[in-house]
Image (spheres, rainbow, N blue to C red):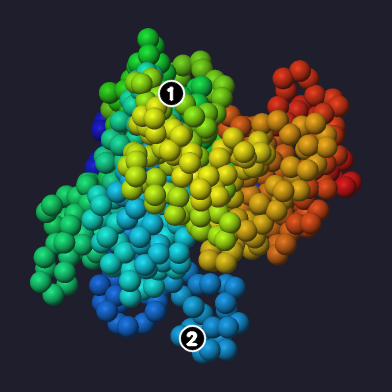
Amino acid sequence: MSQSPESPTPESPKPGAKPSPVELLKAASQGKPPAKASSTEKAPSAKKLSPIEAIKEGSQFLRGDIAKELLDGKPTFGKANGVLLKHHGTYQQDDRDRRKEAKENQAPGGKYFSFMVRTAISGGRITSEQLLAEIDLCDELGDGTLRITTRQGLQLHGVLKENLKATIRRINDVQLTTFAACGDVRRNLMCSPAPYKGDPVYDQMQTLAEELAKELRPQTSAYHELWLTDQETGEKTRVDRHERPEHSDSEPLYGMTYLPRKFKLGVALPGDNSADVYAQDVGYLAICENSKVVGYNVLVGGGMGVTPSAAKTFVGIAQPLAYVPTSDAVDVAKAILKIHRDFGNRADRKVARIRYVVRNWGIESFKKKVEEYLGRDLAPPRPVEVTDYNDALGWGEQGDGRWFYGLSIENGRVKDTESVKLKRALREICEALSPPMRLTPHQNILFCDLAPNDRERLEGILVQHGVPLTEEISTARRWSMACPALPMCGLAVTESERLLPSIIDAMEKELTSLGLENEVFTTRMTGCPNGCARPYNADIGLVGKAKGKYTLFLGGRRQGDRLNWIYKDMVPEADVVPTLVPVFRQFRDERHEGESLGDFCERKKDQLALSGDSA
């Protein structure tokens, strides 16, 4: 088979080419069966490119006019640079709670603008020094809070434009980076985070996550020029850990216009799918023999995010593509990324993720294309299934004589309140014990490498600052998570992070009254259908549909390998728990032995769907 060219050529299809993915997508949206792909498939025509494609193409490899606008004294960037800034790890936002106040005070643009700055942390591995630096930044240049993301990264909110460069530079000063934390590139690499030293497969998976992050990283030096170089002297203050030292105006993997949309990857085990690999564009499910990873089942085409008003959009669970030995794992990821680059829809961003290519070609045709780009055949996937999800919370033995402690942090928000001084507690733990840490895909934190005599000290610090221990958290709260939503996210249509705690409060009471307080099931909530908290494969999904109203999904499961389904639409926030109570009661009365809530809802789907429609 011929090797795929390193630079993309989708913008110049040959006359008479077979139907493009755009045409295939159109057919699919009309209910026609998807056509099969061939090696001569061409990507969408350049004449139909979306405006964002033009912005990227003219950006000089993500530079744009960002340097000029950084110095113009205005609180915001223009639209084009706002698009490019995402690739550098920052989003321009405004405080939607204060829009009336901003207008009354005649703030520029009638809004109080600031920036979210996201740090990409492969597999969630972070040192005490690095976490302290992020806490300092949230206090000094942010809104006083820090947030653990659903992809094992960190987010600062409320950073003013005048402080943006200093913030990004200081993140790099502790050998972290914001580069490619957002944008049309590979996103932060997720990996099952538990620090088991007696089970070497966890370290082997972390090694792959680090390698994928490095090998799929954009190569432009624009990031270092903009954020890590003194504009007057040209002197670099510090570089991040994956920098290419030379000036780079070449993107061998990405090309001038990068990818049609984001590209998410994760690495997990059949017995621990905490990285939610079925929700990724590309997932790696480790195949182990004799306590060693020998290869991976590669999954492709997962993804959360949908536009309810557009029937052509859908969420997806990744499909098994092939089994690959560990030596081929990175090359296969590169091949799939190139296919996304060359065949992803650049005309309509709503259907630009790689799952739409997979769906329209079919998995076998997609596999043939991967083999063509890879230059060799791929083995069929191994017959394995995901069996569990390990959140690694509470105390655990690492296997090397040391311990780790997983602390539940509600919705990942690190802040101090009058009664709970979480931020202060984390600062004291980092300063006193200096443990390495892992951020988890469920927005929690693991303190690692603790000596046996550190256990009492760590718990004492948490208790002293009013931080609930994991053992004191209800099962329902432990397995819940939410996206930030209002007031800062521009896409949110209603509340999520600020509302979910009160929903869990009410849910706890009802579960206790029914004797179900120890049941393990996931509840995930988002303020819009984009699905950042991965609600579409949870046992219970709550997705913002209109102000104060949600679509309620049932029937996913903790293992993450099944989509849920709509139980009831447009549920007012006050009715969420009352709507669930009859489901909980029926689950208690009619479940099979050992059956989870999600499995029960899937088994009773037809009956529950009718009751949901009539509710």
Q: Is residue 150 above or below residue 596?
A: below
Residue 346 visible in the snapshot: no
The residue at which mark 1 appears reads as 397
Q: Is residue 575 above or below residue 337?
A: below
Which residue is at a point 45% across and 20% down the rendered structure image? 381
Tag 2 secondary structure? loop
Q: Quadrant of the N terminus?
A: top left
Q: Residues within 10 Å of mark 2 (few under 14, many from 20)?
A: some
Q: Position of residue 59 (x, y in %)?
A: 29, 65
Task: Give the x, y percent position of residue 452.
Answer: 39, 27
Q: Residue at x 29, y 71 (%)?
A: 66
> Is residue 20 shown left or right of residue 525?
left
Q: Which labelled disc corresponds to residue 107?
A: 2
Q: As displayed, is residue 514 above or below residue 66? A: above
Left/right placement of residue 344 relative to residue 234 reads right
Hey, which residue is sitting farthest right in the picture? 614
